[in-house]
Image: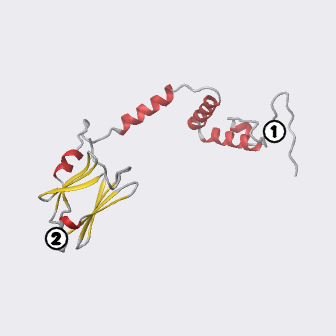
Amino acid sequence: MSLPRHDLFQTDFLVTLTIFKKGCTLDDCKVSFSSRQITVRTGEDVIFVGELGGEVKKDEITVKVTPSKVEVGLPKEVAGRWNNLIEKKEEAETSTVVRPDGGKKNWDKIEKEAVKEEEEEETTGDAAVHKMFKKIYGDANDDVKKAMMKSYQESGGTVLSTNWAEIGSKKTEVKAPDSMEYKKFEQ
């Protein structure tokens, strides 16, 4: 089981340990020491274990519990700054992750897999039409792209042409679908 995320802050007189654990109550929280090792528990669960970087006044420790975190105030025995607030022995062991690929990703392989998945993906209805037009536009040369944009804009979305020689020299007229009539909107 992994321990909850925590944060440490120090002044010359106090170390504040904040443990981000939801659902704790003040009655359940218990702080115990053995030598310089601190253990914080809620009920039976251990939510923090660590070895402090210096001595603290064990009889002046404060515990504050909010709905999202537990704050433990640890007054220092001797005023001053500690080099290490918590010795990182156990944390270093648990945070090491070994990747089978050595931590390097083959982005070319990932891209090829994504393209292959996209091509194999079955689309129907509007999504299939959208995918088709996207492919036509993406694979087209500049003249085809210009023809598509000009014809679509000038016709109000009723005509889409890929022939620049035909579309480039004249204005594209609105062509209503069969059994419909185009009416110009006037304000």
> Percent from the top left, x then y, of residue 169?
75, 43
Left or right placement of residue 13 versus residue 129 in this view: left
Residue 184: image quadrant is top right
- In the image, taking residue 2 as reference, residue 124 lies left or right, namely right
Q: Amino acid at mark 2?
A: Glu
**Circle 2 — which element?**
loop
- Residue occupying the point 87% across, 40% down: 183
Q: Amino acid at mark 1?
A: Val
Number of the label disc, if any, that sits on residue 128: none
Q: Which residue is mark 1?
A: 174
Q: Are marks 2 and 1 in contact (CB under 8 Å)?
A: no
Give the Cα distance between marks 2 and 1. 85 Å
Where residue 92 sits in the image (x, y, percent)? 19, 49
Q: Nearer the viewer, residue 178 or 122?
A: 122
Q: Quadrant of the N terminus?
A: top left
- Residue at coordinates 22% horizontally, 45% vertically from top-left? 94
| Quarter of the figure with residue 20 | bottom left
